[in-house]
Amino acid sequence: MMVATAEAVAQRFGPEYWREHDESEAYPEAFIAALGEHGFFGVTVPEALGGSGQGLSELVLVMEALCRCGGGGGPALGYLFGLLGTMTLAHAAKSERQLGDLRALAAGEKLCAFALSEPDAGTNSFNISTAAIEREDDFVINGAKWFITNLQHSQRLLLVSQTRRLGSDESCGLSLFLVDLPNAALTFTPTPKHGFNYYKSNQLFIDNLVVPKSALVGELGKGFASLAPTLNAERLLVAAGAVGTARLALQAAVGYAKERKVFKAPIGSHQAIQHPLAAAHANLEAAWLMIAEAAALDDAGTSPERAAGMANMAKYVAVEAAIEACYQSLQTYGGAGYAREYHQERWWREVQLFRLAPLTQQMTLNFIGQHVLGMPKSY
Ligand SMILES: Cc1cc2nc3c(=O)[nH]c(=O)nc-3n(C[C@H](O)[C@H](O)[C@H](O)COP(=O)(O)OP(=O)(O)OC[C@H]3O[C@@H](n4cnc5c(N)ncnc54)[C@H](O)[C@@H]3O)c2cc1C
């Protein structure tokens, strides 16, 4: 039922909707509202907290369907970054206030942005310099972040920060804070980018932000422990979004290859066109099986090491397969593939992001080399 609903929602917001938003750079408000109305931000949130209590297996099906049935990359980035804060809270929120926020997020009444990356700390997130000083009754936070997506449309921000005690220079580790938006201590400006400009990714300046002790999510100095349960989800959501986007692009290209006649025959009757599309399809199917296996392993919870290894491998394979499929689909269209009217150039631009964010392909390879193959840590 969830997949059928996701397919129906995606069909309401088809490729033309996303092309218009790509050109106007306007936030896809109606689409995000529809995700909220159908409970898609609460798929993995426990039922007692207003969610559907499902697992990663269901969540990746929803993401894939949203992208495959018309959205392309459009749903992937907005849905992913909307989910990261919510899923972290589902594991780490304890106070009544945070649980109340979680209910509102699961119901789509509020959105939560997620702020980890900094100019000097993306891949190496331990290197962040944003710092929260713990005082008697509150924390005061200063620092800067970049690429923080959808601040303009979020009511909450999950902020990752170093933590220090008043009068000490020593960090007691990374902590998470749930911050209300808008907030006078937070200013931000969007960074124009290669694609996805309908979601603004911002440079964020944090200037003497004072938050109560109750804003702390999880334990002081143990922010990464609170983020850990969402790491596999992040990788698999990206993978599922990439496969859904590529399936949409491929489906369009196959249709075009059957109809477009050059030298009297449909171009799809030439193996130079047909074989790359067939190979792309086979690789996407293989990637999809890996995603399903990784999600099932994570849901079972019986082998965390295998689940993490499989999630990283699935993310790597799916993103490479999706980029190749989008490239071959664009190439099938010839010059038309470069025209905005046919969507291929947009899907191609969008799918590239998944090599870079939220986790680069190199970091998945680092993980596979070290944790799956048992080689020395390479970074
Ligand atoms: C559109 C967009 C939206 C984003 N939204 C958000 C958001 O909402 N919230 C948020 O917190 N962040 C966000 N990000 C940031 C994103 O998570 C980072 O860009 C990503 O983690 C990579 O970090 P970096 O850009 O600093 O790359 P760097 O860390 O500077 O790395 C540069 C390159 O070097 C490679 N590299 C570095 N070290 C190693 C190593 N040891 N071994 C192999 N390769 C290595 C990396 O893989 C990468 O290719 C977003 C980014 C983009 C582009």
Image (cartoon, grey):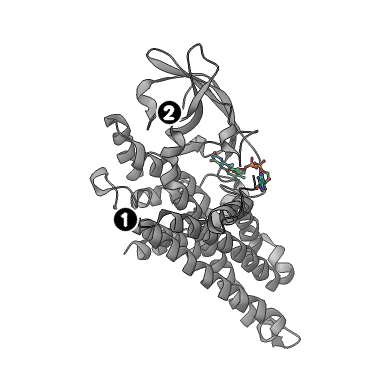
Three-letter amino acid code at disc 2?
A: Val
Asked if residue 187 is positioned above or below residue 315 in the image, the reply reads above
Q: Is residue 146 above or below residue 143?
A: below
Q: Residue at (69%, 82%) from the top-left corner? A: 267
Going by the image, does 277 lie left or right of 298?
Answer: right
**Contact check, label 1 and label 2, Cβ < 8 Å:** no
Most foreground residue, 358 or 7 = 358
Residue 18 position, x and y percent, is: 55, 55
- Asked whether, in this view, residue 18 is left or right of residue 63, the answer is right
Q: Is 188 on the left or on the right of 136, as rendered?
A: right
Question: Quarter-wise, where is residue 148 in the image?
Answer: top right
How much space separates mark 1 and mark 2, taking CA atoms? 27 Å
Furthest residue toward right:
263
Q: Quadrant of the C terminus?
A: top right
Query: Sequence order check: which comes first, mark 1 or mark 2?
Result: 1
Quadrant containing the N terminus in the rendered view: bottom left
Residue marked by disc 1: 54
- Residue located beneath label 2 in the image: 179
Using the image as rendered, state which of residue 39 and residue 141 is in the foreground: 141
